[in-house]
Amino acid sequence: MIDYNELIFEISRPGRKAASLPESDVASVSLLKKFPEHLIRKIPAELPEVSEPQLMRHYTALSNKNFGVDNGFYPLGSCTMKYNPKINEDVARLPGFANIHPFQPVQTVQGALELMYELQEDLKIITGMDALSLQPAAGAQGEWAGLMIMKLFHKQNGEGKKRTKILVPDSAHGTNPSSAFIAGFDVVEIPSNASGTVDLAELKKHVGTDVAGLMLTNPNTLGLFEKDIVEISKIIHGVGGLLYYDGANLNAILGKTTPAVMGFDIVHLNLHKTFSTPHGGGGPGSGPVGVKSFLAPYLPIPRIEKQEDEYVLNSEFPLSVGRVKGYFGNFGVNVRAYTYIRTMGPIGLNQVSESAVLHANYLRKLLAPYYNVSHTQFCKHEFVLSGLKQKKLGVRTMDIAKRLLDFGYYAPTVYFPLIVEEAMMIEPTETETKETLDAFAKTLIGIAKEVEQTPATVLEAPHTTPVRRMDEVKAARKLVVRYNKNDEK
Ligand SMILES: *Cc1c(COP(=O)(O)O)cnc(C)c1O
C-alpha cells in the first residue's frame, strides 16, 4: 500500500518529471537581466521531482483529508455551514466576471457594477435597510465598519466624546466585543436572563447618555428569538443610542422579518454564511454593511450609483468612513451571493427560513431525551445542548465532539456560547435531508449510550482520523509549518 502520508518532498527522485513536451523550436528569452543581481538564485530551488500520476495522487489524497460541506454533514452552530450550490461556482467563473480588473475604466465593467448594484438592492429588501455597501471583506470587518459609522454619527452630533459605551449581551459572538473595542469603545456586557434572552432590568441599569449603541444578534447565539426586541429598541433609542444588528446568520428570518422592522439602525451580513458562498478555510468573505437613511452619508466609499443607464462610482461623501477595503470588496463572493438570491427568489428564501427552523427543532426533539437542552423553548435555526449528564459520568463535551469525527461528521461548535456549561451548539441548516438529520441524531444518541456503557471508547476518540488528539496548546504556540528534511518524521 502506498503511503499517502508522505510529503511530496519525500517521494521526490532526482530527474523524475511530471510532463514531457517536445523540445521547443523557438529561441528562449531570458528575463533574468531584468532582475537585480542580488535577487537571482545562485543554486537551483530544491523542488520536488515527481511523475504526473504521483502528483495527482498526492494532491487528491491531501484534498480527501480535508473535511467540508461537500464531504459530509457540518452541524456547526453560529456559522451557517450550508451547502454551496455549484451553479454559483459556474457563474463566478464566467470570463466576464472572473477576468476583469478593478483598475479597468468603469465603462468597461458596467455588468459587474450592475450585479453589485442589484445585489445591494436585494440585500436592502432582505434587511429593510435604506443604503448598503458591499465593501467589508468579513463579518467582523462589517461590524467594525458599522461601529465606525455609529461613532462618526455621534461625533457629527457633537456627542463623540460623551458616547463611549457599547452594550453587548453575554451570549454575543466573540467578534462583537472585539470589534467594539477596536473601534475605540468601552464594552459593557449585559447578562442574559433564565430564558436565555437579554435581561431588561440589567439592560436598564446600564442605559444612559454615555451609550453609543447596543449590538445584538436576533435570534441570538442560543438560537432564541429576542421577543423583547421592540422594548429593547425603545430603551436604547430613548437615550439617543443606536441599534446594531449582527446579521451574520440570517437563516431564521429570511423573508419573515427584517432588522429594520425590529428597530435596528445598522446591520452587517455574512454573504459567506447565509448566502451560500463557501467559507471555513479563512475566506474570502463578504460582510456588507447596511444602514437606515440618516446614516447613509457615513457608508464606505466609493458607492455604486445608477445614473440613467450607466453605473458610476461616487466618492463625494465628505462624512464617509472612507474606504475600508482595497478595490470593491470580494467581488467573486458577491457573484455567488447574487446567483443564490436570484435562483432562490423571494419564495425560495422564505422556505429556507422555514426549513432551517424546522430542521433545528426536529433535531432538538430527537436529542432532548439523551442530552440536556440549554433552553426548552422553541428554537430558531440552531440550538444548544449541554453535556452535563455526560460530564457527571466523566466524559466531557470535547470527547463527544472528537468521537463524532470517527463517524464522518464535523463536530458542532463546542463550549460556546460561554453561558452554557459543556455547550454543544448545533445548526443543521436547511440544505440537509431528513435522512441526514436522522443519521446524525442516531450517531449522537449512540455516543450518549457509549458514554454510559463503554466510556473509554469516547475518551480515547478519535480512532480513525489521520491525527488523533493533539496537544492543541502546543500546536498553537509551537507551530511547525516548515519542512526540514533532516528532521525526524
Ligand atoms: C461568523 C460570525 C461573525 C463573524 O464573521 P466573520 O466573517 O468570521 O468575521 C459575527 N457574528 C456572528 C453571529 C457570526 O456567526
Image: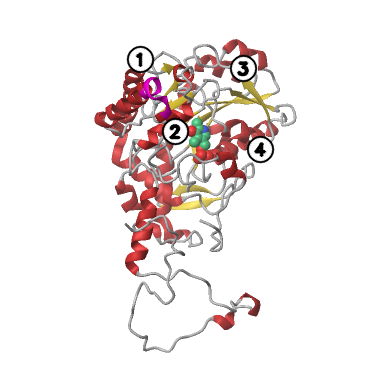
Q: Percent x, y for residue 202?
A: 62, 13
Q: Do the residues under discs 2 and 3 have CB atoms within 8 angstroms?
A: no
Q: Secondary structure at mark 1?
A: loop
Dot 2 or dot 3: first in sequence order is 3
Q: Compare residues 77 and 226 and report the one nearer the observer.
A: 77
Which residue is located at x 43 percent, y 16 percent? 372
Between circles 1 and 3, the one closer to the viewer is: 1
Q: Secondary structure at mark 3?
A: helix
Which residue is located at x 30 percent, y 36 percent? 345
Identify the residue position indicated by label 3 in the image.
238
Q: Percent x, y for residue 178?
A: 62, 34
Measured in 3D between alpha carbons, the distance from the residue under mark 1 to the one under mark 3, in whole angstroms, is: 44 Å
Determine if the C-beta at disc 2 is less than 8 A from ligand 1. no
Measured in 3D between alpha carbons, the distance from the residue under mark 3 to the one under mark 4, in whole angstroms, is: 26 Å
Q: Can you tell which quarter of the image residue 237 is in?
A: top right
Dot 1 or dot 4: first in sequence order is 4
Q: Percent x, y for residue 174?
A: 57, 32
Residue extending farthest left: 435
Q: Amino acid at mark 1?
A: Pro
Between circles 1 and 2, the one closer to the viewer is: 2
Q: Which mark is residue 369?
A: 1
Q: Amino acid at mark 2?
A: Glu
